[in-house]
Image: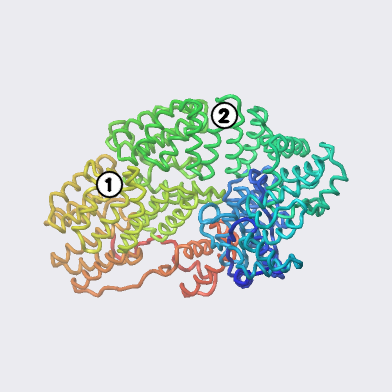
């Protein structure tokens, strides 16, 4: 079919197809009003895509509530390729397509679709075409949006059409093109083609009437020729065009109208179901013949389809409510026994009043959707089930279940609204029990932590089961810590420590270790004498423990117990990646990055925090994203990169300050102070560091005041504030006595040497370097060497100074801590010795994603295995490796094992034991 006036649009599609064939994939959303010609443009793309695998589906209003129906239509021709996918992905996709009872989450399904499409594209380019995307079910939309944003290096083009601007929703971030109306000349050319007998005056009138809408231009001549059709001047597109279609329907017999209504209500194009429903209503072959001759409906095999999507909409919207309800009842009766979801929705559409049987069927359908990872579909089913529930208690329970499903699907806003709706029907206590304490968890992750604390404490006594009680209690303590409310923190800790395991044997095994770990929150020693020695446990024993049961990582660092937890988190990361549980993975990556930064694994910290930030933003976990930004800011501070510090810190404060999350506020103030200190601006440094210990300040937080004490004291000494330095020394001394943490003892000695600086300083510097385990935080250990070397130079012990300064410079060089490396080298020059000015490490030129890919390739993982873990396509893995090799000066995958990519520091200072 000739496309009039679409030269610009078709040229763009042709270019995108050419680029995709050359390996530069992309996505594009064509959007505009109904009838504007979007489907015709898709047909053009399909027509010119020779030698391409085409996967195509269309959204329908009825299927919008049925999980993965659009994905089923799209992928059905290639389901024979599922066995080529990694086993977890293949199982997840079979579950989504109804080929098994496998349970999976939406991100694993999205990764499976990406792998399948990428594998197909290895043989020939792939064109994915989705028409009426505004009506496809949300789980399919999520999967396709996931794919469309990750095919930049694959020969794949994803084309979608919709009615509205796609700048928000599942297509957010994809390129979009609004399709406008035809100009008058092109409109006249189209009319001349579709109505060759029309005169110039009629063509002008129809051109003005259509407003450039191609569907109107096609239909106006036909409607004008109808005996009862309106004159052109009285017809307008939109509602009047729909009424014109209804006029054609009303001219048919009553059985023909009933058949058309059945097809419109069925909305999936299943001819067998429509025929069975029609037979149940007494519709025979003669009626089918009449409808097919009308041109409004056509058949192809087991499919029925209307001449245009506006036709079924006009038929359905124009039918009387009793007729629509009768059609849905007939369709429900015609469905096979296993079609639970379809039957539930048809019966729901037919319901005239609350109906517990239909509500229960919808609830059953929601459970099925949840098992196959279609949380948004389950939310819709449970919401409708609540509307049909005769009893308020049942309606409230189903709304609470919908809220939980929305939360687990990453939609916190919808979850909050559903909880509000449920609490209008039943008490907050009942809803807390039904939602497993969701209100407090929501408030903690997206709202105000102090408010979350109070809700969580209240709900601890409401929820059923010891495990739920323990989880809520652990989050309540953490919420108080986040708010900087030590009093609430200790009160909640007492309540949490009193919870027993009941009959939960698995929890009973974990509780002693959990209680030991929770003693981290007791920063005063008033509650329990337990100190968290070995509180990390073993990876085998703790890998199943949820993130909410772990103390915050800054508190773990304060206690100095990060070593055992690091292995636990490493195992959790691997397991969560395998299961594609992205929300939990984002949380654990944010925690791991904090520990890696302290351990001198700056490359791993950068990679983990960046990965965690990307995932947190994708799933809408705002607080987790802010934690990752705080880590990236502190990392940038060590590197002396002020603009990056400010970018991340400012974004973190936008979230933290309005919500009173003092832990996040403090974590943003600290890197601002550190970068100012390390780049020679001690006065500015104190403006950011002093508030951490000021009661009542928005950034005041005891944990961050403690961790930043060394920075504060050093800046204070540089500006002559000995009193301030002594106060921070006193705080760390008290903490060292309470926690017996190695880093705290080392910091006490360092600050004593810095503050007193007399002959006794050397003893304290040497003692700081000798503290067992102090070298496990190499950045701080090297800072001690730097200060000691500077002291030795001022004492005219130049040879000893050069030894300490060289050791410090080597560590700073390996870390990429530019400002302190340059300071160490300058001090070496002043000490009269040659300064080894090495360049950055071998991986310094790699992007975060290139570094992740290189590490996994060095561990002998294949491109497909790397792609599955990083949620990208295998071709994208190859693209990154092609960039990695020249940057590292190597030419093959095997050589990666010889390059230091993991960021570990191995101190190699000959002859030094302190």
Residue 796 appears at what percent x and percent y?
13, 67
* Residue at left offset 81%, top offset 37%: 281
Residue 245 appears at what percent x and percent y?
71, 50
Name above or below for residue 404 compared with residue 98. Answer: above
Element class at badge 1: loop
Q: Are marks 2 and 1 in contact (CB under 8 Å)?
A: no
* Residue at left offset 39%, top offset 50%: 627
Nearest the eye: 736 or 321: 321
Circle 1 residue: 699
Label 2 or label 1, whichever lies nearer to me, is 2
Left or right: 367, with 752 as reference point? right
Name above or below for residue 282 compared with residue 598. Answer: above
Residue 444 appears at what percent x and percent y?
41, 40
Is residue 465 among what the camera can see? no
Q: Earlier in the sequence, mark 2 or mark 1?
A: 2
Task: Indicate the quadrant containing the N terminus: top left, top right, bottom left or bottom right.
Answer: bottom right
* Residue at left offset 50%, top offset 65%: 854
Question: Which numbered marker is on residue 395?
Answer: 2
Left or right: 600, with 57 as reference point? left
Q: Could you tell me how far apart the alpha carbons at marks 2 and 1 are, in whole angstroms?
A: 43 Å
Disc 1 crowd rating (10 Å Cα; few below 14, some 14-19, many 20+) is many
Nearest the eye: 713 or 117: 117
Disc 2 crowd rating (10 Å Cα; few below 14, some 14-19, many 20+) is many
Element class at badge 2: helix
Left or right: 527, with 173 as reference point? left
Which residue sits furthest right? 286
Q: Report which quarter residue 717 is drawn in.
A: bottom left
Residue 625 appears at what percent x and percent y?
42, 51
Nearest the eye: 776 or 599: 599
């Amino acid at each position: 079919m000739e496309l009039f006036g679409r030269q610009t649009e078709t040229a763009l599609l042709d270019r995108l197809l050419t680029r995709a064939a050359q390996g530069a994939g992309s996505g594009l959303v064509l959007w505009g009003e109904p009838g504007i010609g979007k489907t015709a443009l898709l047909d053009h793309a399909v027509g010119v895509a020779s030698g391409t695998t085409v996967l195509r589906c269309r959204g329908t209003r009825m299927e919008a509530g049925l999980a993965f129906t659009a994905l089923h239509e799209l992928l059905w021709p290639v389901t024979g390729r599922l066995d080529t996918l990694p086993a977890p992905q293949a199982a997840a996709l079979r579950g989504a397509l109804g080929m098994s009872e496998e349970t999976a989450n939406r991100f694993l399904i999205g990764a499976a679709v990406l792998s399948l499409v990428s594998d197909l594209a290895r043989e020939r380019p792939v064109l994915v075409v989705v028409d009426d995307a505004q009506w496809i079910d949300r789980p399919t939309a999520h999967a396709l949006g996931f794919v469309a944003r990750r095919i930049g290096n694959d020969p794949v083009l994803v084309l979608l059409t919709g009615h509205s601007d796609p700048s928000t929703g599942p297509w957010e971030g994809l390129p979009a093109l609004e399709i406008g109306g035809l100009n008058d000349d092109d409109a006249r050319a189209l009319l001349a083609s579709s109505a060759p007998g029309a005169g110039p005056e009629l063509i002008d009138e129809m051109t003005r009437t259509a407003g450039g809408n191609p569907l109107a231009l096609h239909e106006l001549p036909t409607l004008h020729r109808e005996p009862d059709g309106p004159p052109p001047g009285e017809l307008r597109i939109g509602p009047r065009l729909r009424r014109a279609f209804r006029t054609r329907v009303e001219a048919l017999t009553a059985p023909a109208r009933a058949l058309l209504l059945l097809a419109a209500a069925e909305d999936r194009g299943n001819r067998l179901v429509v025929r069975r429903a029609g037979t149940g209503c007494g519709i025979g072959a003669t009626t089918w013949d009449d409808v097919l001759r009308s041109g409004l409906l056509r058949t192809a095999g087991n499919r029925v389809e209307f001449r245009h999507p506006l036709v079924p909409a006009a038929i359905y919207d124009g039918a009387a409510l009793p007729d629509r309800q009768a059609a849905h009842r007939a369709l429900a009766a015609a469905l096979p026994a296993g079609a639970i979801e379809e039957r539930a929705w048809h019966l729901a559409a037919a319901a005239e009043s609350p109906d517990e049987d239909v509500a229960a069927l919808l609830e059953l359908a929601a459970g099925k959707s949840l098992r196959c990872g279609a949380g948004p579909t389950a939310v819709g089913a449970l919401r409708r089930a609540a509307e049909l529930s005769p009893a308020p208690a049942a309606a409230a329970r189903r709304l609470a279940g919908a809220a939980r499903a929305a939360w687990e699907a990453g939609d916190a806003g919808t979850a909050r609204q559903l909880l509000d709706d449920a609490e209008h029907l039943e008490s907050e206590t009942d809803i807390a029990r039904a939602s497993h304490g969701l209100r407090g968890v929501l408030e903690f992750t997206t709202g105000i932590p102090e408010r979350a604390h109070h809700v969580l404490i209240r709900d601890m006594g409401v929820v059923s089961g010891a495990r739920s009680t323990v989880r809520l209690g652990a989050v309540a303590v953490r919420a108080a810590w986040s708010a900087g409310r030590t009093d609430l923190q200790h009160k909640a800790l007492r309540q949490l420590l009193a919870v027993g395991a009941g009959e939960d044997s698995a929890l009973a095994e974990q509780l002693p270790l959990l209680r030991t770990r929770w003693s981290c929150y007791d920063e005063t020693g008033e509650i329990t004498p337990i100190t968290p020695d070995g509180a990390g446990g073993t990876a085998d024993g703790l890998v199943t423990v949820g993130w909410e049961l772990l103390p915050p990582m800054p508190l773990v660092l304060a206690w100095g117990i990060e070593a055992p937890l690091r292995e636990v988190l490493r195992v959790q990361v691997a397991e969560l990646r395998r299961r594609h549980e992205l929300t939990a993975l984002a949380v654990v990556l944010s925690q791991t990055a904090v520990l890696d930064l302290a351990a001198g694994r700056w490359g791993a910290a950068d990679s983990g925090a960046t990965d965690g930030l990307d995932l947190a933003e994708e799933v809408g976990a705002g607080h987790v994203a802010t934690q990752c930004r705080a880590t990236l800011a502190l990392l940038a501070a060590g590197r002396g990169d002020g603009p990056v510090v400010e970018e991340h810190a400012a974004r973190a404060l936008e979230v933290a300050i309005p919500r009173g999350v003092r832990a996040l506020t403090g974590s943003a103030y600290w890197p601002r102070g550190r970068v100012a200190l390390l780049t020679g601006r001690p006065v500015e440094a104190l403006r950011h560091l002093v508030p951490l210990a000021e009661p009542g300040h928005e950034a005041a937080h005891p944990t961050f005041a403690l961790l930043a004490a060394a920075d504060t004291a050093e800046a204070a000494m540089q500006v002559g504030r000995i009193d301030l330095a002594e106060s921070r020394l006193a705080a760390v001394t008290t903490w060292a006595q309470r926690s017996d943490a190695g880093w705290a003892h080392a910091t006490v000695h360092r600050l004593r040497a810095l503050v007193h600086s007399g002959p006794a300083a050397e003893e304290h510097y040497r003692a700081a370097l000798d503290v067992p385990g102090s070298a496990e935080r190499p950045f701080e250990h090297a800072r001690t060497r730097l200060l000691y070397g500077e002291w030795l130079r001022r004492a005219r012990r130049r040879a000893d100074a050069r030894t300490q300064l060289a050791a410090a410079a080597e560590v700073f060089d390996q870390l990429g801590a530019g400002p302190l490396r340059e300071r160490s080298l300058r001090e070496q020059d002043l000490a009269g010795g040659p300064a080894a000015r090495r360049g950055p490490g071998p991986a310094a030129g790699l992007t975060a994603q290139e570094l992740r890919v290189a590490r996994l390739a060095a561990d002998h993982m294949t491109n497909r295995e790397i792609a599955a873990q990083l949620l990208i396509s295998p071709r994208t893995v190859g693209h990154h490796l092609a960039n990695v090799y020249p940057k590292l000066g190597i030419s093959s995958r095997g050589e990666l094992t010889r390059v230091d990519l993991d960021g570990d520091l191995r101190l190699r200072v000959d002859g030094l034991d302190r």
